[in-house]
Amino acid sequence: MQSTRTVSDKIFLFLKGLAMGAANKVPGVSGGVVAFVAGFYEEFIYSLQKFNLKSLKLLFNGRFRSFFQYINAKFLFLLILGMVFSYFSVSKLLDYLIEHFELYVWASFFGMIIGSIYYIGKDFEIKSLRTIIFIILGVLAGLSISFLKPATENDHLLFVFFCGIISVSGMTLPGLSGSFILILLGNYVLLLVDSVNALYDTIADVLKGDFSFTKDLKRIRLLEVLTSFTAGSLFGLITLSHLLNYVLKHYKKITFSIIIGFITGSLGVVWPWKEKIFKKNNMGEVLVDTNGDPVLDNYSRYLPEFSEISTWVAIFFIIIGILIVLSLAWYGRQRKTT
Protein backbone atom coordinates (compact mmCIF):
# COMPACT_ATOMS: atom_id res chain seq x y z
CA MET A 1 0.00 0.00 0.00
CA GLN A 2 1.38 3.39 -0.96
CA SER A 3 2.11 5.85 1.84
CA THR A 4 2.65 8.93 -0.33
CA ARG A 5 1.01 9.99 -3.56
CA THR A 6 1.97 12.67 -6.06
CA VAL A 7 -0.58 15.07 -7.53
CA SER A 8 -0.72 13.00 -10.73
CA ASP A 9 -1.29 9.84 -8.65
CA LYS A 10 -4.22 11.54 -6.91
CA ILE A 11 -5.75 12.68 -10.19
CA PHE A 12 -5.33 9.20 -11.67
CA LEU A 13 -6.91 7.64 -8.56
CA PHE A 14 -9.88 10.02 -8.85
CA LEU A 15 -10.27 8.95 -12.51
CA LYS A 16 -10.20 5.30 -11.42
CA GLY A 17 -13.05 6.06 -9.03
CA LEU A 18 -14.86 7.79 -11.89
CA ALA A 19 -14.47 4.65 -14.01
CA MET A 20 -15.63 2.40 -11.16
CA GLY A 21 -18.73 4.54 -10.60
CA ALA A 22 -19.59 4.50 -14.30
CA ALA A 23 -19.07 0.72 -14.51
CA ASN A 24 -21.26 0.11 -11.46
CA LYS A 25 -24.09 2.05 -13.10
CA VAL A 26 -24.17 -0.14 -16.22
CA PRO A 27 -26.04 -3.46 -15.90
CA GLY A 28 -23.68 -6.35 -16.57
CA VAL A 29 -20.48 -4.41 -15.87
CA SER A 30 -18.63 -4.61 -12.56
CA GLY A 31 -16.69 -1.79 -10.93
CA GLY A 32 -14.59 -4.50 -9.33
CA VAL A 33 -13.26 -5.40 -12.77
CA VAL A 34 -11.99 -1.82 -13.12
CA ALA A 35 -10.23 -2.13 -9.77
CA PHE A 36 -8.78 -5.51 -10.77
CA VAL A 37 -7.44 -4.38 -14.15
CA ALA A 38 -6.22 -1.01 -12.88
CA GLY A 39 -4.19 -2.81 -10.22
CA PHE A 40 -5.69 -1.44 -7.00
CA TYR A 41 -8.22 -4.16 -6.16
CA GLU A 42 -6.26 -5.67 -3.26
CA GLU A 43 -5.44 -2.23 -1.79
CA PHE A 44 -9.13 -1.33 -2.07
CA ILE A 45 -10.22 -4.46 -0.18
CA TYR A 46 -7.37 -4.09 2.32
CA SER A 47 -8.33 -0.47 3.06
CA LEU A 48 -12.03 -1.24 3.52
CA GLN A 49 -11.37 -4.05 5.99
CA LYS A 50 -9.46 -1.57 8.14
CA PHE A 51 -12.86 -0.37 9.38
CA ASN A 52 -12.71 -2.56 12.48
CA LEU A 53 -12.56 -2.34 16.27
CA LYS A 54 -9.06 -0.89 16.21
CA SER A 55 -10.12 1.96 13.90
CA LEU A 56 -13.15 2.66 16.11
CA LYS A 57 -10.91 2.86 19.18
CA LEU A 58 -8.61 5.32 17.41
CA LEU A 59 -11.62 7.42 16.39
CA PHE A 60 -13.31 7.45 19.79
CA ASN A 61 -10.00 8.25 21.53
CA GLY A 62 -9.59 11.34 19.35
CA ARG A 63 -6.53 10.02 17.54
CA PHE A 64 -7.79 11.27 14.20
CA ARG A 65 -4.42 11.39 12.45
CA SER A 66 -3.70 7.77 13.36
CA PHE A 67 -7.26 6.83 12.36
CA PHE A 68 -6.92 8.35 8.88
CA GLN A 69 -3.54 6.72 8.35
CA TYR A 70 -4.80 3.35 9.56
CA ILE A 71 -7.80 3.23 7.21
CA ASN A 72 -5.79 4.60 4.24
CA ALA A 73 -8.20 7.54 4.14
CA LYS A 74 -6.55 9.49 1.28
CA PHE A 75 -6.84 6.51 -1.02
CA LEU A 76 -10.47 5.78 -0.12
CA PHE A 77 -11.51 9.45 -0.20
CA LEU A 78 -10.20 10.07 -3.72
CA LEU A 79 -11.62 6.80 -5.01
CA ILE A 80 -15.08 7.32 -3.46
CA LEU A 81 -15.08 10.98 -4.53
CA GLY A 82 -14.58 9.81 -8.12
CA MET A 83 -17.45 7.32 -7.77
CA VAL A 84 -19.83 9.92 -6.33
CA PHE A 85 -18.88 12.47 -9.00
CA SER A 86 -19.48 9.80 -11.63
CA TYR A 87 -23.11 9.35 -10.57
CA PHE A 88 -23.82 13.01 -11.38
CA SER A 89 -21.73 13.25 -14.55
CA VAL A 90 -20.47 10.18 -16.42
CA SER A 91 -23.45 8.01 -15.44
CA LYS A 92 -25.83 10.69 -16.72
CA LEU A 93 -24.00 10.57 -20.05
CA LEU A 94 -24.19 6.77 -20.03
CA ASP A 95 -27.95 6.92 -19.50
CA TYR A 96 -28.22 9.07 -22.62
CA LEU A 97 -25.90 6.88 -24.70
CA ILE A 98 -27.67 3.67 -23.69
CA GLU A 99 -31.02 5.22 -24.64
CA HIS A 100 -29.85 6.41 -28.09
CA PHE A 101 -26.91 4.10 -29.00
CA GLU A 102 -27.64 0.99 -26.98
CA LEU A 103 -25.98 -1.55 -29.33
CA TYR A 104 -22.70 0.35 -29.47
CA VAL A 105 -22.58 0.96 -25.70
CA TRP A 106 -23.10 -2.75 -25.00
CA ALA A 107 -20.50 -3.59 -27.65
CA SER A 108 -17.96 -1.29 -25.99
CA PHE A 109 -18.49 -2.88 -22.59
CA PHE A 110 -18.44 -6.37 -24.12
CA GLY A 111 -15.02 -5.53 -25.54
CA MET A 112 -13.86 -4.10 -22.21
CA ILE A 113 -14.79 -7.32 -20.43
CA ILE A 114 -12.96 -9.39 -23.06
CA GLY A 115 -9.92 -7.16 -22.53
CA SER A 116 -10.26 -7.61 -18.77
CA ILE A 117 -10.41 -11.39 -19.09
CA TYR A 118 -7.25 -11.37 -21.21
CA TYR A 119 -5.41 -9.03 -18.83
CA ILE A 120 -6.36 -10.91 -15.67
CA GLY A 121 -5.83 -14.36 -17.17
CA LYS A 122 -2.62 -13.83 -19.16
CA ASP A 123 -0.32 -14.44 -16.17
CA PHE A 124 -2.65 -16.86 -14.43
CA GLU A 125 -1.20 -20.36 -14.41
CA ILE A 126 -3.55 -23.32 -14.37
CA LYS A 127 -1.66 -26.07 -12.58
CA SER A 128 -4.39 -28.28 -11.17
CA LEU A 129 -7.78 -29.78 -11.90
CA ARG A 130 -9.17 -27.91 -8.89
CA THR A 131 -8.31 -24.57 -10.53
CA ILE A 132 -10.14 -25.61 -13.72
CA ILE A 133 -13.17 -26.71 -11.70
CA PHE A 134 -13.42 -23.36 -9.89
CA ILE A 135 -13.08 -21.45 -13.18
CA ILE A 136 -15.91 -23.53 -14.65
CA LEU A 137 -18.04 -22.94 -11.54
CA GLY A 138 -17.43 -19.21 -11.89
CA VAL A 139 -18.46 -19.29 -15.57
CA LEU A 140 -21.64 -21.24 -14.78
CA ALA A 141 -22.55 -18.87 -11.94
CA GLY A 142 -22.04 -15.83 -14.19
CA LEU A 143 -24.11 -17.34 -17.01
CA SER A 144 -26.93 -18.49 -14.72
CA ILE A 145 -27.34 -15.01 -13.25
CA SER A 146 -27.61 -13.51 -16.73
CA PHE A 147 -30.73 -15.60 -17.49
CA LEU A 148 -32.67 -14.94 -14.28
CA LYS A 149 -35.93 -12.97 -14.51
CA PRO A 150 -36.27 -9.61 -12.71
CA ALA A 151 -38.60 -9.18 -9.73
CA THR A 152 -41.03 -6.29 -9.27
CA GLU A 153 -40.11 -2.94 -7.68
CA ASN A 154 -40.16 -2.76 -3.87
CA ASP A 155 -39.44 0.46 -1.94
CA HIS A 156 -39.66 -0.98 1.59
CA LEU A 157 -36.68 0.53 3.42
CA LEU A 158 -35.44 -2.79 4.85
CA PHE A 159 -35.51 -4.37 1.40
CA VAL A 160 -33.76 -1.29 -0.02
CA PHE A 161 -31.08 -1.65 2.69
CA PHE A 162 -30.64 -5.29 1.59
CA CYS A 163 -30.40 -4.10 -2.04
CA GLY A 164 -27.56 -1.81 -0.97
CA ILE A 165 -25.66 -4.72 0.59
CA ILE A 166 -26.14 -6.89 -2.48
CA SER A 167 -25.53 -4.23 -5.14
CA VAL A 168 -22.21 -3.12 -3.65
CA SER A 169 -20.88 -6.57 -4.50
CA GLY A 170 -20.13 -5.13 -7.95
CA MET A 171 -17.32 -3.10 -6.39
CA THR A 172 -15.91 -5.88 -4.25
CA LEU A 173 -16.50 -8.92 -6.48
CA PRO A 174 -15.12 -8.51 -10.01
CA GLY A 175 -17.51 -9.90 -12.60
CA LEU A 176 -20.63 -9.59 -10.43
CA SER A 177 -22.59 -6.57 -11.68
CA GLY A 178 -24.29 -4.75 -8.81
CA SER A 179 -26.57 -2.84 -11.17
CA PHE A 180 -27.67 -6.05 -12.91
CA ILE A 181 -28.41 -7.57 -9.50
CA LEU A 182 -30.63 -4.54 -8.85
CA ILE A 183 -32.49 -5.26 -12.09
CA LEU A 184 -33.07 -8.83 -10.90
CA LEU A 185 -34.30 -7.47 -7.55
CA GLY A 186 -36.62 -5.10 -9.43
CA ASN A 187 -35.13 -1.91 -8.00
CA TYR A 188 -32.65 -0.66 -10.63
CA VAL A 189 -34.77 2.28 -11.81
CA LEU A 190 -35.86 3.17 -8.27
CA LEU A 191 -32.35 3.18 -6.77
CA LEU A 192 -30.00 4.18 -9.57
CA VAL A 193 -32.26 6.48 -11.59
CA ASP A 194 -35.23 7.91 -9.68
CA SER A 195 -33.60 8.33 -6.26
CA VAL A 196 -30.33 9.68 -7.69
CA ASN A 197 -32.27 12.17 -9.83
CA ALA A 198 -34.27 13.15 -6.73
CA LEU A 199 -31.03 13.89 -4.86
CA TYR A 200 -29.67 15.82 -7.85
CA ASP A 201 -32.85 17.92 -8.06
CA THR A 202 -32.83 18.49 -4.29
CA ILE A 203 -29.25 19.75 -4.30
CA ALA A 204 -30.11 22.07 -7.20
CA ASP A 205 -33.15 23.39 -5.31
CA VAL A 206 -31.15 23.97 -2.11
CA LEU A 207 -28.48 25.89 -4.03
CA LYS A 208 -31.23 28.10 -5.45
CA GLY A 209 -32.73 28.59 -1.97
CA ASP A 210 -35.89 26.72 -2.93
CA PHE A 211 -37.11 24.42 -0.13
CA SER A 212 -40.54 23.69 -1.55
CA PHE A 213 -39.43 20.09 -2.11
CA THR A 214 -40.01 19.47 1.62
CA LYS A 215 -43.74 19.32 0.80
CA ASP A 216 -43.21 16.91 -2.09
CA LEU A 217 -44.00 13.53 -0.53
CA LYS A 218 -42.70 11.58 -3.52
CA ARG A 219 -39.36 13.43 -3.43
CA ILE A 220 -39.02 12.92 0.33
CA ARG A 221 -39.77 9.22 -0.04
CA LEU A 222 -37.13 8.86 -2.76
CA LEU A 223 -34.58 10.60 -0.50
CA GLU A 224 -35.46 8.19 2.32
CA VAL A 225 -34.99 5.29 -0.09
CA LEU A 226 -31.61 6.64 -1.23
CA THR A 227 -30.50 7.08 2.40
CA SER A 228 -31.40 3.47 3.23
CA PHE A 229 -29.71 2.25 0.05
CA THR A 230 -26.53 4.21 0.85
CA ALA A 231 -26.45 2.84 4.40
CA GLY A 232 -26.82 -0.70 3.08
CA SER A 233 -24.06 -0.11 0.53
CA LEU A 234 -21.63 1.15 3.19
CA PHE A 235 -22.49 -1.77 5.47
CA GLY A 236 -22.01 -4.20 2.59
CA LEU A 237 -18.69 -2.67 1.56
CA ILE A 238 -17.21 -3.06 5.01
CA THR A 239 -18.56 -6.53 5.79
CA LEU A 240 -17.76 -8.01 2.36
CA SER A 241 -14.26 -6.51 2.44
CA HIS A 242 -13.47 -8.42 5.65
CA LEU A 243 -14.62 -11.66 4.07
CA LEU A 244 -12.72 -11.02 0.84
CA ASN A 245 -9.55 -9.99 2.66
CA TYR A 246 -9.66 -13.35 4.46
CA VAL A 247 -10.19 -15.44 1.31
CA LEU A 248 -7.54 -13.47 -0.62
CA LYS A 249 -5.04 -14.23 2.14
CA HIS A 250 -5.87 -17.92 2.51
CA TYR A 251 -7.39 -18.95 -0.84
CA LYS A 252 -5.95 -16.51 -3.37
CA LYS A 253 -5.60 -19.03 -6.21
CA ILE A 254 -9.16 -20.30 -5.79
CA THR A 255 -10.52 -16.74 -5.49
CA PHE A 256 -8.78 -15.65 -8.69
CA SER A 257 -10.05 -18.78 -10.47
CA ILE A 258 -13.65 -17.99 -9.54
CA ILE A 259 -13.22 -14.30 -10.46
CA ILE A 260 -11.84 -15.19 -13.92
CA GLY A 261 -14.71 -17.60 -14.46
CA PHE A 262 -17.31 -15.17 -13.18
CA ILE A 263 -16.10 -12.36 -15.44
CA THR A 264 -16.17 -14.75 -18.40
CA GLY A 265 -19.71 -15.81 -17.52
CA SER A 266 -20.82 -12.18 -17.26
CA LEU A 267 -20.29 -11.82 -21.02
CA GLY A 268 -23.78 -13.26 -21.34
CA VAL A 269 -25.21 -10.23 -19.54
CA VAL A 270 -23.54 -7.65 -21.79
CA TRP A 271 -23.96 -9.52 -25.10
CA PRO A 272 -24.66 -6.56 -27.44
CA TRP A 273 -27.22 -8.19 -29.71
CA LYS A 274 -30.35 -8.51 -27.60
CA GLU A 275 -33.87 -7.17 -27.33
CA LYS A 276 -35.76 -6.22 -24.19
CA ILE A 277 -38.76 -8.33 -23.23
CA PHE A 278 -41.27 -6.44 -21.10
CA LYS A 279 -43.68 -7.84 -18.55
CA LYS A 280 -47.31 -8.15 -19.62
CA ASN A 281 -50.57 -8.70 -17.78
CA ASN A 282 -53.13 -11.40 -18.53
CA MET A 283 -54.60 -9.19 -21.26
CA GLY A 284 -51.26 -9.03 -23.06
CA GLU A 285 -50.73 -5.35 -22.15
CA VAL A 286 -47.23 -4.17 -21.23
CA LEU A 287 -46.91 -3.30 -17.54
CA VAL A 288 -45.44 0.08 -16.59
CA ASP A 289 -43.79 1.39 -13.42
CA THR A 290 -44.71 4.53 -11.46
CA ASN A 291 -42.90 6.67 -14.04
CA GLY A 292 -44.86 5.17 -16.92
CA ASP A 293 -41.86 3.20 -18.20
CA PRO A 294 -42.33 -0.43 -19.32
CA VAL A 295 -41.22 -3.03 -16.76
CA LEU A 296 -38.33 -5.21 -17.97
CA ASP A 297 -38.89 -8.97 -17.82
CA ASN A 298 -35.78 -10.31 -19.54
CA TYR A 299 -33.62 -10.10 -22.66
CA SER A 300 -33.91 -12.04 -25.90
CA ARG A 301 -30.40 -12.60 -27.26
CA TYR A 302 -29.68 -13.30 -30.93
CA LEU A 303 -26.73 -13.66 -33.30
CA PRO A 304 -25.70 -10.56 -35.29
CA GLU A 305 -26.59 -10.14 -38.95
CA PHE A 306 -23.27 -9.59 -40.73
CA SER A 307 -24.91 -8.02 -43.75
CA GLU A 308 -25.87 -5.00 -41.63
CA ILE A 309 -23.52 -2.03 -41.23
CA SER A 310 -24.53 -1.65 -37.57
CA THR A 311 -23.02 -5.08 -36.85
CA TRP A 312 -19.61 -4.02 -38.15
CA VAL A 313 -19.82 -0.73 -36.27
CA ALA A 314 -20.57 -2.71 -33.11
CA ILE A 315 -17.59 -5.00 -33.77
CA PHE A 316 -15.46 -1.88 -34.16
CA PHE A 317 -16.64 -0.71 -30.72
CA ILE A 318 -15.84 -4.15 -29.26
CA ILE A 319 -12.26 -3.71 -30.49
CA ILE A 320 -12.20 -0.18 -29.05
CA GLY A 321 -13.38 -1.56 -25.69
CA ILE A 322 -10.59 -4.15 -25.68
CA LEU A 323 -7.98 -1.51 -26.53
CA ILE A 324 -9.26 0.84 -23.81
CA VAL A 325 -8.76 -1.79 -21.10
CA LEU A 326 -5.35 -2.90 -22.35
CA SER A 327 -4.22 0.72 -22.72
CA LEU A 328 -5.30 1.55 -19.16
CA ALA A 329 -3.55 -1.57 -17.86
CA TRP A 330 -0.38 -0.66 -19.76
CA TYR A 331 -0.52 2.92 -18.48
CA GLY A 332 -0.95 1.68 -14.92
CA ARG A 333 2.09 -0.60 -15.23
CA GLN A 334 4.18 2.24 -16.68
CA ARG A 335 3.32 4.49 -13.74
CA LYS A 336 4.40 1.80 -11.30
CA THR A 337 7.81 1.46 -12.96
CA THR A 338 8.53 5.23 -13.06
Image (cartoon, rainbow, N blue to C red):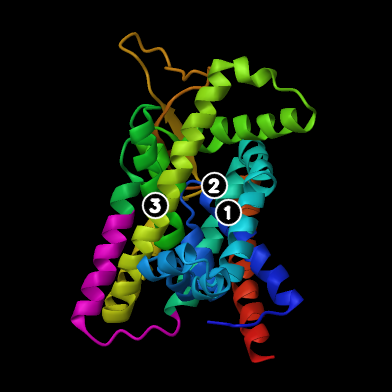
Disc 1 to disc 2: CB gap under 8 Å: yes
Image coordinates of residue 36 in percent, x first then y, are: 49, 71
Left or right: 168, with 148 as reference point: right
SS of the residue under disc 3 = helix
Up the image or down, 91 lies above or below 210; here it is below
**Foreground: 308 or 147?**
147
Within-10-Å neighbours for mark 1: few <14, some 14–19, many 20+: many
- Name the residue type under label 2: Lys
Q: Is residue 3 visible?
A: yes
SS of the residue under disc 2 = helix
User: Reading the chain from its start, which is encountered first: label 1 or label 3?
Assistant: 1
Left or right: 130, with 34 as reference point: left
Magenta segment main secondary structure:
helix
Image coordinates of residue 14 in percent, x first then y, are: 67, 64
Calculate the distance from the C-alpha at mark 1 to the C-alpha at mark 3: 18 Å
- Name the residue type under label 3: Phe
Which residue in the structure is indicated by mark 2? 25
- Name the residue type under label 1: Gly
Which residues fall within the magenta stretch?
122-142
Which residue in the structure is indicated by mark 1? 21
The C terminus: image quadrant: bottom right
* Residue drawn at point x = 72 percent, y = 69 percent: 11
Within-10-Å neighbours for mark 3: few <14, some 14–19, many 20+: some
Residue 233 is covered by the magenta coloring: no
* Residue drawn at point x = 52 percent, y = 27 percent: 222
**Foreground: 277 or 219?**
219
Up the image or down, 120 lies above or below 87; here it is below
User: In front of the other: label 1 or label 3?
Assistant: 3
* Residue drawn at point x = 69 percent, y = 43 percent: 93
Disc 1 to disc 3: CB gap under 8 Å: no
Label of residue 235 in the image? 3
